[in-house]
């Protein structure tokens, strides 16, 4: 398991900087890592549905009522970085039962709250803010360390070559981490839609 200091030291080592003993150390390396850690951790978590951060819950309806358009409002969890599925609908993609792309979304997020006509309790899947580094996947740790190194390179080293080297590590590690992460969940089939299906089924004979 890696601590915040372990991850910060991995980032500093990529840049050839001195290791730290605490995020509160009185040196430029600790200050650079401390200023960026929480922000970049959340950015990396929300950029991809890492399986260790995916959380499912059931939401109760709020007593507030939408002004128009929908019947119900749901408040998102306090640790919610990004929704993945709301009810039965994947966020960003919605297909009707016929397979035709829907023109009307089954929900909208307005003012950070879910507006929908789906009844309570609402099934909700989201990326949670995980502050406990002991829960991080080892490859996520490496990707986060590389991201910290890239972001802090100018401040700490003023070296383009060190920044580029850290960026290469970041890209390679992120690619491998995402590949491994995808093994934890089988791919979901998505309807091809009536137009595509009609082309598949078409026969000139």
Image (cartoon, helix red, strand yellow):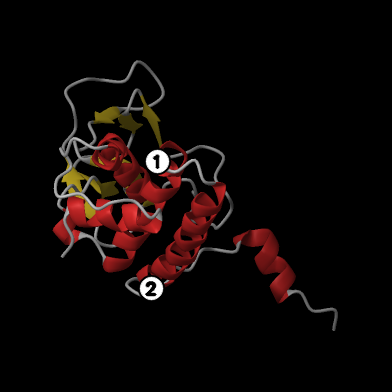
Characterize the local packing of mark 1: few (<14), some (14-19) or many (20 or more) Cα atoms within 10 angstroms. Answer: some
68 left or right of 92? left
Q: Which residue is depicted at the point 17% across and 60% down?
A: 135
Above or below, 63 relative to 10: above
Q: Position of residue 196 (x, y in %)?
A: 68, 64
Which numbered circle lies on residue 180?
2
111 left or right of 195? left
Mark 2 element type = helix
Q: Quadrant of the C terminus?
A: bottom right
Count the marks: 2
Distance from disc 1 to disc 2, alpha carbons, whole Å, reads 32 Å
Mark 1 touches mark 2? (CB < 8 Å): no
71 left or right of 150? left
Note whether residue 144 is visible. Answer: no
Q: Nearer the viewer, residue 46 or 115?
A: 46
Q: Nearer the viewer, residue 129 or 166?
A: 166
Q: Position of residue 166 (x, y in %)?
A: 46, 56
Name the residue that disc number 1 marks: 156
Characterize the local packing of mark 2: few (<14), some (14-19) or many (20 or more) Cα atoms within 10 angstroms. Answer: few
Mark 1 element type = helix
Specify the farthest residue to the right.
Answer: 204
Q: Which residue is depicted at the point 33% across and 34% down?
A: 117
Note whether residue 6 is visible. Answer: yes
Lower sequence index among marks 1 and 2: 1
Which numbered circle lies on residue 81?
none
Q: Which numbered disc, 1 or 2, marks the residue closer to the eye?
A: 1
Q: Position of residue 38 (x, y in %)?
A: 26, 40
Q: Quadrant of the N terminus?
A: bottom left
């Amino acid at each position: 398991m890696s601590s915040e200091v372990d991850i910060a030291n991995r980032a500093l080592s990529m840049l050839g900087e001195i290791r730290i003993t605490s995020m509160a150390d009185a040196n430029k390396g600790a200050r650079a890592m401390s200023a960026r850690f929480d922000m970049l951790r959340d950015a990396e978590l929300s950029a991809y549905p890492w399986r260790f951060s995916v959380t499912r819950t059931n939401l109760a309806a709020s007593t507030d009522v939408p002004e128009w358009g929908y019947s119900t409002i749901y408040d998102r969890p306090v640790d919610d970085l990004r929704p993945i599925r709301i009810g039965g609908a994947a966020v960003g993609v919605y297909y009707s039962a016929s397979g035709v792309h829907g023109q009307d979304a089954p929900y909208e997020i307005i003012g950070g709250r879910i507006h929908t006509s789906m009844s309570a309790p609402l099934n909700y899947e989201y990326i949670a803010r995980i502050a406990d580094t002991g829960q991080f996947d080892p490859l996520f740790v490496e990707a986060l360390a590389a991201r910290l190194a890239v972001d802090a390179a100018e401040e700490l080293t003023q070296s383009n070559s060190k920044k580029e080297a850290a960026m290469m590590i970041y890209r390679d590690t992120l690619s491998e981490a995402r590949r491994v992460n995808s093994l934890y969940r089988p791919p979901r089939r998505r309807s091809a839609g009536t137009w595509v299906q009609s082309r598949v089924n078409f026969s000139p004979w």
